[in-house]
Structure formats: structure tokens, C-alpha cells
Amino acid sequence: MPEGGAAALPELLAAGLPPGTVHTGVRVTEASVSRVTTAEHGVFRCRSVVLATGARTAARLLPGLRTPAFHPVTVLHHTAPVAPTGDPVLLLESDPDGPVAHTAVMSAVDPGRVPAGRTLITSTVLGTPPDDTERRVRKHLATLYGTSTDEWELLALRHTPDAVPAMPPPHDGHRSVRLLAGLYVCGDHRATSTPGAPSPRATARPAPS
Ligand SMILES: Cc1cc2nc3c(=O)[nH]c(=O)nc-3n(C[C@H](O)[C@H](O)[C@H](O)COP(=O)(O)OP(=O)(O)OC[C@H]3O[C@@H](n4cnc5c(N)ncnc54)[C@H](O)[C@@H]3O)c2cc1C
């Protein structure tokens, strides 16, 4: 979890490039080895293309590309009068019925994310969440942190149905990023479904999809 949030890493990478190299907020509508068409900024000619969108957009731009199934993820953000722990640790639940899979006091992990004196606890539910998600998560968090959560306040609950590509066995963790000379596709749908997992080395062997 980078300090400043997940965007901190790409921002650091972009900062090392010559000014004007990266354009954001540009929606690509067509892509090929030699040209990229955008919705609002015309056509860019090029010698090669790296397509790094999610799986569905990649398959729309390059028809025939495999689209995996997805797993849903629900993330809940609470604030508490007192942090249940001052340690910047990730608590993992071994019981698959959870419903919480993992939780962390984000204000301890990265104090810059919260106003001074506030606490932020972020918890993740994997898969389809139960009907009464917030009540069950709050009860589970009381057990995990060993403290009452009655005074905790829910700040946000975000459900993402297509959060992470499924990796049912046999999973090919070495799917090539190189489709053709000059045409590359990369992202969590090509290797492992999260940058938090060890990612297999990208290979240069050609692969059709
Ligand atoms: C709720 C949630 C929680 C997660 N938590 C964790 C976690 O704690 N740890 C962890 O390691 N992973 C986590 N993940 C997984 C992680 O976010 C993804 O694996 C990772 O972001 C995938 O990176 P990517 O570069 O493949 O794709 P993305 O990060 O999805 O990047 C794709 C980019 O393509 C852009 N794009 C899409 N269409 C177009 C278009 N037509 N034109 C131009 N640009 C386009 C998008 O705007 C986006 O910036 C989580 C995912 C979710 C949804």
C-alpha cells in the first residue's frame, strides 16, 4: 500500500519522464500497431502500442482477446473514536465465511490519508457480499480487533462487481504481453489479478489471445 494511495506509484513513474509525455483523461476508441484513435483528441500515429486497459476494454479495442470472469470486491471505510490498534498491520481472516477477508487501520498505515486526529479503518469483503453487509462486517471487526465497534461510523461502502479477474485452474500466469511485433497487451488480466501478488515474468513468446 503506497503512501498517498495507489495513484502514488504511477505518478512517481510519470514524474521521471520528459514533460508532456503522459496525457491523462484521453479515451481511446480504436487501437492498432500504427495508430490510436481517441474520443476527444484525434488520432496519434505510432510505431507500437501497449494496451494497458482492463480486460473488457482491451477486448473491445482488440476483438478476439480473451475476457476472463471476474470476482466482486466490497470495501468498507469506517472511522472510530479511538483506533483499535496503532500498528500499521494487515489483519487476515482465515475463516472463509468471514465476511471480512482482511482489514487495516489505514490511518496507522498512512497517516497522510486522514485529517489529524481522525481514524480510518478499511476492510475488504471478497466475493458476493451478504445482505446485511455492514452489520455483519462491524460485528466481525469487533472480533478481529478485540474491541467494541458500536461507536464506529461507516464513511463509505463501495461494491465493485468486476473487481479482479478470476484465475481458475489451470491458470496461465505466463500469458504473453506481446501479441504481434509492436502490439502489446498488459494488465492484471494477462498475469495475476493483483499487483500485490507475485507476478510471473512477462515473456516475449507470441500468443494469439
Ligand atoms: C476494490 C478493489 C480493491 C483492490 N485492492 C487491491 C489491493 O489491496 N492490493 C492489490 O494489490 N490489488 C488490489 N486490487 C487490484 C488492483 O487494483 C488491480 O489488479 C490493478 O489496478 C490492475 O492494474 P492494471 O494496470 O491491469 O489495470 P487498471 O489499474 O484497471 O488500469 C487500467 C487503466 O486503463 C484506463 N482505460 C480504460 N479504458 C480506457 C480507454 N478506452 N482509453 C484510455 N484509457 C482507458 C483506465 O482509466 C485505467 O487507468 C483491487 C481492485 C479493486 C477493484
Image: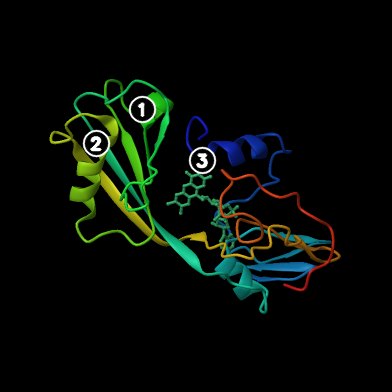
Q: Is residue 21 left or right of residue 181?
A: left
Comes first in the chain, label 1 or label 3: 3
Q: Is residue 45 left or right of residue 38?
A: right
> CB of residue at label 3: within 8 Å of ligand 1?
yes
Residue drawn at (59%, 72%), measured in percent from left and top? 67
Q: Nearer the viewer, residue 98 or 50?
A: 98
The residue at which mark 2 appears reads as 143
Do labels 1 and 3 touch, CB within 8 Å? no
Residue drawn at (25%, 42%), measured in percent from left and top? 140
Q: Nearer the viewer, residue 78 or 168?
A: 168
* Res. 114 in view: yes
Q: Is residue 3 left or right of residue 179?
A: left
Quick one: which residue is furthest to the bottom in this view?
A: 64
The residue at which mark 1 appears reads as 107
Query: Which picture quadrant has residue 79?
Result: top left
Residue type pointed to by label 1: Ser
The residue at which mark 3 appears reads as 6
Task: State the separation of the CA atoms marked 2 and 3.
Answer: 28 Å
**Image color mode:** rainbow
* Res. 39 in view: no
Helix, strand or loop for disc 2: helix
Q: Is residue 3 left or right of residue 138?
A: right
Q: Measured along the vertical axis of the image, is residue 87 above or below residue 41?
A: above
| Residue 159: image location, x then y, percent | 34, 57
Helix, strand or loop for disc 3: loop
